[in-house]
Image (cartoon, helix red, strand yellow):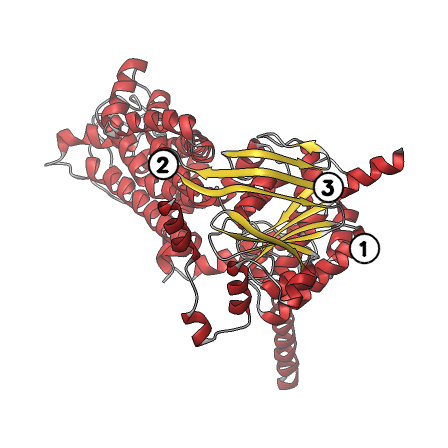
Amino acid sequence: MTMRNNTDAAGADVAQAETACVNETWRAWLLSDQPHSRTQARLGCFYRTWAAFLENRLAVFGLAIVLGLVLMATFADVLAPTSPVVGGDLRTERLLPPSAAHWFGTDDQARDLFSRIVHGARLTLLVVALVALIATPIGLLVGTVAGYFGGLIDQALMRVTDIFLAFPRLILALAFVAALGPGIENAILAIAITSWPPYARIARAETLTIRNADYINAVRLQGASSLRIIWGHIVPLCISSVIIRVTLDMAGIILTAAGLGFLGLGAQPPLPEWGAMVASGRRYLIDYWWVATVPGIAIFVVSLGFNLLGDGLRDVFDPKAQK
Amino acid sequence: MTGTMAETASKAMIEVDDLHVTFGRGPRATHAVRGVGFRVAAGESYGLVGESGSGKSTVLRALAGLVEGWRGRMTVAGRVLGPRREAAFYKLVQMVFQDPYGSLHPRHTVERILSEPVAIHRLGAADRRIEQALGDVGLGPQFRYRYPHQLSGGQRQRVAIARALILEPKILLLDEPTSALDVSIQAEVLNLLARLKRERGLTYILVSHNLAVVAHMCTRLAVMNRGTIVEEMTVAQLRRGAPRHPYTKQLLTASRGYDRTAVDAFIDFAEAEAGSIART
């Protein structure tokens, strides 16, 4: 009996050693200073960055929140116990406090707040993703083109950027939504239109520091076109600082979307948009605090997550901010 | 007939006449190069020597097309250079920069750096060419997928030379190619450049403040000061220690090492000349 136990234990030990060994080989392969292929070199670079990122506990926490948001949005149908739009019995289930049946309570339409929060994650993620996808390329393009060519092109592009920067974002977004009509799509468009100028500025500043570098001169001397130089050589160096800024701006974007929703210009009822939920809960704030507070906490947590993630990315990508 | 044609062509691979380069405009303009002219024969190594700010690198950059606002006449292989260079020029003329830490893209692997010129000129067979170029500069295939930060200064400069050679140019412009490297690596890189020149019949213009490097690599040289060529001579003349212009003598003294009495006797030619201009 003891013998068998011993052999079992020994077997387990061997298995453990083997996995450790395999892990060790992987690590060595990734960290090899003599990569054998383009993919290995790239993965090695990625692994180093990832390892540096993992050392920052708060950033990992931020990443976990963001991943949680993504998972919640993906599996909203499974996670939500009831429909986010259709409420229960208006006579008995209105404005119930948090309980085992309704984790976050119910709102004035007798809808389960937990289900609405879970489905609202989809809207929040939609806003954040679409704004990032629209605003980042515009900002990068305007900034790198202005910085690379300089002269009149720079003047023209940066003055347009300055005009957009001269308005507070929410006010400009309000004007756009007023012109385009209320709704979540128009809110996204308005936020995207108002959030690219800072990215253009960052991209331009980065481009100005590298456009006269010898490695850019070298590729110019090989006869590369401006498009090739900007896309293949300048954008890869600007993109990390722009991504950092976009991540840090995510919180602001969520808040702007929530603000538009709160003012009734963003998502329209009965969509479970967090900002609109805060607005509708405002009327019951004193007696039924959870109706406005729970979506508020959701906005707060997700904004915090994006900020922590952005800080972590900055620590990893920005060589000037290294401790 | 064809013989004389070939001879005239070989006589001057590069011709520069009355080159002026001005940076900036109006009262803040800097006249960096003032009427420089020289000829370099095919297969020759020509040195441009001078202290920092004498305009020697600017001449090289104007020739490469990296400087705007130049006046004068420059021809390469019989073709007059305009303000914009066409693709054929880049296949003929390539450049190696001074600082190997600044001349390689930090986010590109050696492979990417070398495959870029092949892709731009649609040469094809990138794989074979990259292997060949790395072999030519004495780097093994294990360097192919490394990033610049995984290379030493000498290795980086070899990659930069490989990048310049992958287009198989006839002319290589060398902008202080060894001044950022430590002494033992300097010799390695210079020997590599000398070997490549022998094997491929390249024409070099070497810019340097180091007279020993120029004497080792070149047959003729021009000494520049304050944007003009003060003296042109052969390396044999330099070796004999027979420069005529006082500035060249001073440069030669300086290159022999630090000597208190010699340094005390130095004249600032910038001030001396400004004085003479003011007098006239």
The residue lying toward the viewer, choosing from A69 and A151, is A151
Is residue B113 shown to the viewer in this render?
yes
* Apparent side of residue B258 relative to residue B41 in the rendered image (left or right): left
Q: Chain of mark 3?
A: B
Disc 1 marks a residue whose amino acid type is Glu
Whether discs 2 and 1 lie on one chain: the answer is no
Q: Nearer the viewer, mark 2 or mark 1?
A: 1
For label 2, the residue is A201
Residue B43: where, in percent of width, then height?
A: 76, 49
Residue A128: where, in percent of width, then height?
A: 38, 34
Q: Residue at x 13, y 35 (%)?
A: A285
Residue A196: where, in percent of width, then height?
A: 37, 31
Q: Residue at x 57, y 38 (%)?
A: B18
For label 3, the residue is B12
Is B98 rendered above or below residue A138?
A: below
Is residue A22 shown to the viewer in this render?
no
The residue lying toward the viewer, choosing from B17 and A250, is B17
For label 1, the residue is B199
